[in-house]
Amino acid sequence: MAFHTRSNSFPSRPHPIAQQVGELLCRLRSSEATSTSSSSISHKLNGLQDLQDCVDRLLQLPLNQQALAQEQNEKYTNELLDGSIRLLDVCAIAKDAVLQTKECILDLQSIIRRTRGGESGTLTSEVNKYLSSRKILNRAIQKALKNLKGIKNRSTLSSLNKDQETIDIVIKLRDVETVTIMVLESVLSFISGPKSKPSSWSLVSKMMHLKKVACNEETEVNEFAEVDATLKTSKFHPQNQLQNLESCIQDHEERLEGLFRQLIKTRVSFLNILNH
């Protein structure tokens, strides 16, 4: 009998889906210190989509739905819902940014082919249009990054149901939100390119720096920044760099679309719990 009582005191084993969420969280956290190359961003987006898929399945478990729907826990569920809406908005901004950049690149490539790389008023106008578009996109990205910071302010868990499983699920969902913010910040920062250096850092210096990075550490090349810096020099037109950026954008566009769809599913799951 003593053995039976003792065995009941052992903590219950986490659900396999919860374990999978934990594993994916660890992988994405460890990727934070990795390079910010295009391939690294793609890897993070893939991992984030897998994580959000697991979260959606975690939210479908009846015990989790009952816990999050309890009246004393609704405040935290509403916070998570609010966060999911903001994450969805930021993901949409990232999607729009790569799509608009892609459209400008296709226009540039078309004009360069027609003029065979020579200077023309039309080509100069298209380059200026591209650079103006990038400035507008970067302002939207900076606003989105500030919006992400607003999600991080969370209330304490003081009024949360003291059931350990309920506490665990809320903490895990907050961890997912934090990691999602981390990845989206990386994506937005990659799209906008590195922050501008002081004005004394000339465009030629920028180009030399980019070439040095490409030679010494190829994985760290930012295709968006390369094209921006090259076009600003007005010395030559980067057909190869434009093609590389187009390929990079195509890759990120598909992954952002998949993540966007998954974030919608997560938001719907939170709504269903609150309306249960």
Image (cartoon, rainbow, N blue to C red):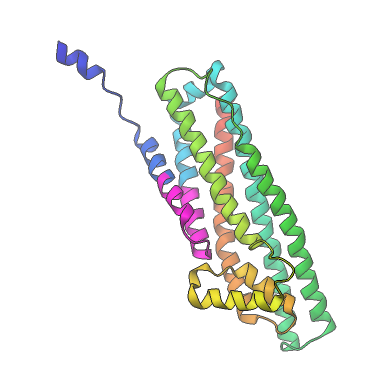
Q: Main secondary structure of the magenta part?
A: helix
Using the rendered image of the protein, determine whether residue 62 is visible from the camera's viewpoint. no
**Residue most toward the top?**
1
Left or right side of 3 for 76: right
Compare residues 226 and 54 and report the one nearer the observer. 226
Tell me the quarter of the image containing the N terminus: top left
Residue ID at (48%, 22%): 67
Using the rendered image of the protein, determine whether residue 234 is visible from the camera's viewpoint. yes
Q: Which residues are magenta?
A: 26-50
Residue 190 image point, x, y percent: 60, 60
Residue 248 image point, x, y percent: 57, 67
Compare residues 32 and 116 and report the one nearer the observer. 32
Left or right side of 30 for 109: right
Residue ID at (63%, 33%): 82
Residue ID at (66%, 80%): 238
271 within the magenta span: no
Residue 36 image point, x, y percent: 53, 61
Compare residues 174 and 267 and report the one nearer the observer. 174
Q: Is residue 128 above or below residue 80?
A: below
Left or right side of 16 for 101: right
Residue 27 image point, x, y percent: 41, 49
Q: Is residue 185 above or below residue 13?
A: below
**Residue most toward the right?**
121
Residue ID at (57%, 70%): 247
**Residue most toward the front?**
200
Tell me the quarter of the image containing the C terminus: top right
Left or right side of 251 for 96: right
43 within the magenta span: yes
